[in-house]
Amino acid sequence: MMFTSSCAGCNQPGVVLCHRCRFALASAKAQVSDGGVLSPLPFEGVARRVVHGLKYRNRRQVAKVLATLIARRLKLGRVDVVTWAPTSGSRARARGYDQAELLARAVAHELGVPCRRLLYRCHGQQQTGHTRAERLQGPQFRARPVSQRLRVLLVDDVVTTGATMAAARDALLGAGIGEVLCVAAASTPAHAGQPVKPAQRRTVAMASAGSSPTTTPRMPTASAAATLEGTSSRKAVRSGWAPSLARAS
Ligand SMILES: [Zn+2]
């Protein structure tokens, strides 16, 4: 039998993610970074190779796998719209895609909510290749102004210093977004706190502009999404994550 693909975790010829790597991801401990970003995976070992596969080796199929982990292993609560911290234009052009956007769209599909571009990167900055001090300052983003308070899920592929997420979150809050929940597929263990405890999950990663999660007015997802663009919110196709991996191959 000829395999045209190989495992993104161990490079073994075959499906997009082999049994062993799938198990390694499924049993990894969810993380909460110092900056309050939730992620289902520590950025090490198999998870690191899989995320790098998405980012540098054109392994786009793993976006669905990582999105499933984000949607199912983190307690996200209500989400009105999903967006992403865009990578620099030159990077995205070189790769042919923006891995953060790919991931955000897969997460939105999994949750059955719309995904919208709300952020733009200023000056085409990129984080990779800079020193840690430079990366701590983070890139600059500008956000589309929105008229309605929304609970936005901000998605990125990986969090190392947290500067990119913080800058993106601040831009969203500055543009009038009600609340921003930050998630990444993986975060660097050195900068991560403890594994997420269930009670922490709802509160720790929530940033809001002047309101607590309990007082944020709820609004129907459909009407909230309609304020951004004429939108069709697709129902998530709920399938077991192991079968969905097999199909993704
Ligand atoms: Zn593998």
Image (cartoon, grey):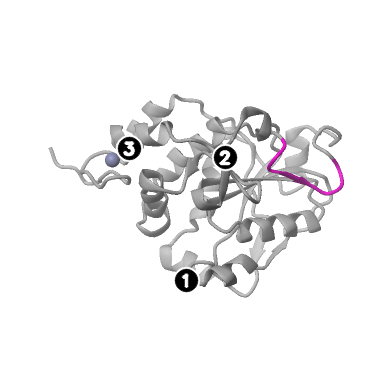
Magenta stretch contains residue 204:
yes
Residue 22 horizontal/vertical position (percent): 35, 34
Query: Amino acid under label 1?
Result: Gly
Magenta segment boundaries in residue numbering: 203-211
**Res. 138 in view:** no
Q: Residue at x 58, y 34 (%)?
A: 74
Q: Quadrant of residue 202?
A: top right
* Observer-nearest of 195 and 219: 195
Q: Looking at the figure, which quarter contains the C terminus?
A: top left
- Residue 185: which disc? none
**Mark 2 CB in 8 Å range of ligand 1?**
no
The Cα atoms of the two marked residues, 3 and 2, are separated by 23 Å
Q: Quadrant of ligand 1?
A: top left
SS of the residue at dot 2?
A: strand
Where residue 37 appears, x then y in whole percent?
62, 46
Mark 2 sits on what residue?
194
Disc 3: residue Cβ within 8 A of ligand 1's nearest atom: yes
The mark that comes first in sequence, 1 or 2, is: 1
Mark pair 1, 2: CA separation: 28 Å
Write the residue at 56% across / 34% down.
71
Q: Nearer the viewer, residue 33 or 209?
A: 33
From the top left corner, tell me how far across and down residue 155 is, in percent: 59, 48
Residue that carries the numbered disc 1 in the rendered image: 129
Q: Earlier in the sequence, mark 3 or mark 1?
A: 3
Instruction: Determine which quarter of the picture holds residue 118.
Output: bottom right
The residue beneath circle 3 is 21
Direction bottom: furthest residue = 123
